[in-house]
Image: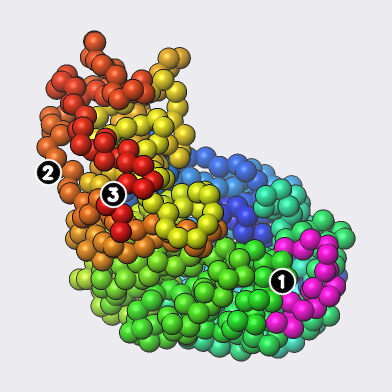
């Protein structure tokens, strides 16, 4: 018997290439091989192939937020793309595999259409070849998946035991055995038969190690070093209302032995040249003593061999103490990915999120002391959260030496949050493909999509400031913002909405970022910048105003005045937002810009003078050239000891 295991392509506004290693399928492949089944892997995402797609009609409402050709480093997303092998190629690869069974991994509810399309291709190639589907989406929406005409079987829970049994039953032509198999859903007599629950493997140490020989290890690199996923435990005992992990991996914390973890790491190093291990456990730190012990054994085994560790799935600070932070730092962790979700105590209780903000702060303090670069994941738009509460979370992280990792809430079927959204009519559409972060799918009476977009962009802007603080020379004490962004060598003055700027060369992302940040800090506006044209002698940009929420920006300003922004790599580097200039004034109040639309975007009017001393020309729609405001430029060029700093 031969099975073809497929990881489908995804269609979205972005892809995180580094973390697409199909470790679930590699576990399944290893178990199938142990049972004597021949396995081929078709990882549709193991390619750099991507192409732009027309935006599906149900996504059209996102267009105003994702401006194409936006060159701002604070942009959210732009094109909707297909990431992975093209559909024709997938069909051809399925045809060439001549498999007896097709197994498809459907991990993501929002990408269910991609998984079903792969199933349809498989049936088009060979209608008699059974198609089996498993993965987190199947556990969330088993009935819908099985109802699809191109899916013959679904497997709930973990598939390492069930799939080989199913393959064996199909190989021996024993359809009667199906109902006896744990976790298998099937069709008979026009009816769907779904199991009560999926399989949960108690002794995960007994599982054969993932069949990494089926992938190209050189495809997954970070800074030129090979990286792989490592799973040391499965399951999480917590009940966070938005999380669907329990549907697949249960609530029992199941662990692997230290010797098995080390054995896997050794194989990865020796056979595949792995240097970085990304621990993707559901809750790595749930048992702190165990986590510390794992790290001690790794140090013992690989001491000076340059092993690096990551936990990109995020670690809940709830179960992290000082000893664990130190052990992480001493065992190859350079970064600590935390997952506070929200700093608001009421929301933490409502979402049953473990831990507290004061404890999170202690972990951050320790992380900074030992030199870990930290990022913290926040969820924006949880049902019942208020704008003030989300802004407070953002400001909290702004004032800590962590990058802000915002994720927009989406509701996964099978979770308490999903039920809550359904009951209260919070889903803007019943279409499950929209239940992804990039779709901002949930609005409530307390916040709109525009609010969420603004909050999301605000996080990017604050991270931009943090990054600038990190590139400044080290040392204790205050870092003045005007040293960092107010006097960039190239651009003077504030960028103005609907102006064309003609520049002798392409601006760097840092230059564009500095300039737009200045508009944000001094004028309180979130601007974008579009590359309009590029020829041999000049590059033309147009500045425009991003869609943003005035209440969010106003509340943020009120909260942020006099507060500090901290760097990440240099935790003691900080600046005071608005400290130098006081509360920002609205751009409109400066009355610098006419609102008449541009007459085409063809180039500057004849004789237009250079703006500032940098060769940049402004092109206003009325043909007139607005005079740069002298007070602004002089304020901008105050030296590092300039007045006004608090
Ligand atoms: C790594 C990961 C990613 C990676 C991508 C992984 C990949 N392979 O492509 C990245 C970081 C890119 C990612 C992104 C997203 N993710 Co993610 N991700 C995970 C994570 C943390 C681990 C997956 C994993 O490897 N698990 C370990 C292996 C062993 O388990 P497994 O893959 O589930 O496989 C087992 C079973 O499911 C089953 N099985 C799986 N496939 C098959 C196939 C067959 C035929 C059979 C029989 C059985 C079977 O058997 C396997 C072995 O036991 C999971 C959480 C989790 N613990 O699963 C979330 C998870 C899958 N992600 C989730 C989501 C929603 C997303 C996003 C869509 C969120 C968003 N931004 O909107 C994005 C996608 C964005 C994008 N544009 O790419 C949700 C999915 C829930 C759902 N029903 O939709 C999860 C469950 C997280 C959660 N908290 O709810 N993710
Ligand atoms: S701690 Fe993490 S894995 Fe556990 S339920 Fe909460 S979000 Fe899910």
> Is residue 459 something that shows in the picture?
no
Q: Position of residue 287 (x, y in %)?
A: 64, 87
Going by the image, does 104 lie left or right of 483?
Answer: right
Q: Residue at x 38, y 87 (%)?
A: 349
The x, y position of residue 498, in whole percent, is 23, 32
Return the residue found at the far top. Answer: 606
Comparing 50 with 523, the one in front is: 523
Residue 603 visible: yes
Q: Crowding at label 1, few (<14), some or many (≥20) Cα neighbours within 10 Å?
A: some
**Magenta part of the protein: which range?**
292-308
Distance from disc 3 to disc 2, alpha carbons, whole Å, reads 24 Å
Proximity of marks 2 and 1: CB atoms separated by less than 8 Å? no
Please give the residue where the numbered disc 1 appears in the rendered image: 330
Q: Secondary structure at mark 1?
A: helix
Between disc 2 and disc 1, whose residue precedes?
1
Question: Is the image coloured rainbow, by chain, by secondary structure, or in one colour?
Answer: rainbow
Is residue 247 rendered magenta in the image? no
**Was residue 296 drawn as part of the magenta stretch in this picture?**
yes
Answer left or right for 208 relative to 339. Answer: right
Residue that label 3 marks: 643
Q: Which residue is mark 2?
A: 589
Q: Of circles 1 and 3, which is in front?
A: 3
Q: How many marks?
A: 3
């Amino acid at each position: 018997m031969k099975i073809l295991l497929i990881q489908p392509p995804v269609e979205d506004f972005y892809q995180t290439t580094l973390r697409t290693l199909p470790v679930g399928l590699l576990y399944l492949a290893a178990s199938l091989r142990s049972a004597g089944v021949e396995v081929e892997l078709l990882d549709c995402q193991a390619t750099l192939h991507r192409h732009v797609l027309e935006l599906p009609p149900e996504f059209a409402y996102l267009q105003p937020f994702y401006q194409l050709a936006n060159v701002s480093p604070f942009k959210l997303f732009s094109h909707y793309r297909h990431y992975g092998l093209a559909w024709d190629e997938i069909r051809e690869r399925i045809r060439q595999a001549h498999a007896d069974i097709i197994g498809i991994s459907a991990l993501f509810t929002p990408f269910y259409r991609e998984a079903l399309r792969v199933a349809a291709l498989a049936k088009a190639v060979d209608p008699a070849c059974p198609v089996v589907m498993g993965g987190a989406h199947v556990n969330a929406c088993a009935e819908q998946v099985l109802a699809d005409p191109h899916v013959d079987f679904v497997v709930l829970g973990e598939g390492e035991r069930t799939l080989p049994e199913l393959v064996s039953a199909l190989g021996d032509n024993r359809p009667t055995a199906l109902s006896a198999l744990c976790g298998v859903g099937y069709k008979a007599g026009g009816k769907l038969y779904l199991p009560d629950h999926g399989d949960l493997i108690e002794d995960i140490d007994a599982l054969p190690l993932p069949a990494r020989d089926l992938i190209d290890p050189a495809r997954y690199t970070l800074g030129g070093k090979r990286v792989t996923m490592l799973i040391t435990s499965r399951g999480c005992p917590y009940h966070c209302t938005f999380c669907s992990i329990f549907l697949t991996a249960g609530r029992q914390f199941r662990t692997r032995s230290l010797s098995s973890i080390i054995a896997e790491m050794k194989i990865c190093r020796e056979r595949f040249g792995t240097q970085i291990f990304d621990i993707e456990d559901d809750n790595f730190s749930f048992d702190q003593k165990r986590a510390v012990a794992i790290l001690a054994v790794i140090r013992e085994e690989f001491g000076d061999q340059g092993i690096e560790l990551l936990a990109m799935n995020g670690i809940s600070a709830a179960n992290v103490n000082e000893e664990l932070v130190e052990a992480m730092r001493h065992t190859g962790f350079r970064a600590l990915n935390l997952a506070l979700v929200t700093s608001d105590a009421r929301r933490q209780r409502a979402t049953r999120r473990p831990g507290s903000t004061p404890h999170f702060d202690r972990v951050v303090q320790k992380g900074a002391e030992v030199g870990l670069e930290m990022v913290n994941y926040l969820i924006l738009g949880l049902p019942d959260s208020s704008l003030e509460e989300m802004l407070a979370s953002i400001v909290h992280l702004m004032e800590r030496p962590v990058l802000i990792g915002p994720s927009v809430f989406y509701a996964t079927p099978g979770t308490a949050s999903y039920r809550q959204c359904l009951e209260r009519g919070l889903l803007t559409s019943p279409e499950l493909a929209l239940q992804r972060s990039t779709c901002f799918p949930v609005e409530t009476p307390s916040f709109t999509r525009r609010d969420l977009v603004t909050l999301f962009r605000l996080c990017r802007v604050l991270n931009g400031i943090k990054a600038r603080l990190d590139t400044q020379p080290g040392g204790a004490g205050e870092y003045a913002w005007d040293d960092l962004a107010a006097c960039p060598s190239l651009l003077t003055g504030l960028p103005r909405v609907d102006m064309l700027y003609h520049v002798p060369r392409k601006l760097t992302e840092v230059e564009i970022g500095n300039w737009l940040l200045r508009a944000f800090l001094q004028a309180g506006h979130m601007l974008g910048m579009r590359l309009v044209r590029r020829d041999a002698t000049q590059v033309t940009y147009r500045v425009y105003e991003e869609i943003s929420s005035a209440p969010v920006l106003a509340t943020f300003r009120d909260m942020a005045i006099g507060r500090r922004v901290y760097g990440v790599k240099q935790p003691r580097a900080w600046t005071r937002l608005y400290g130098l200039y006081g509360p920002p004034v609205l751009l409109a109040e400066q009355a610098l810009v006419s609102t008449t639309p541009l007459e085409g975007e063809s180039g500057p009017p004849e004789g237009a003078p250079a703006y500032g001393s940098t060769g940049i020309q402004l092109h206003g729609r009325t043909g007139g050239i607005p005079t740069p405001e002298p007070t602004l430029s002089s304020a901008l060029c105050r030296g590092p000891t300039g007045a006004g700093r608090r």
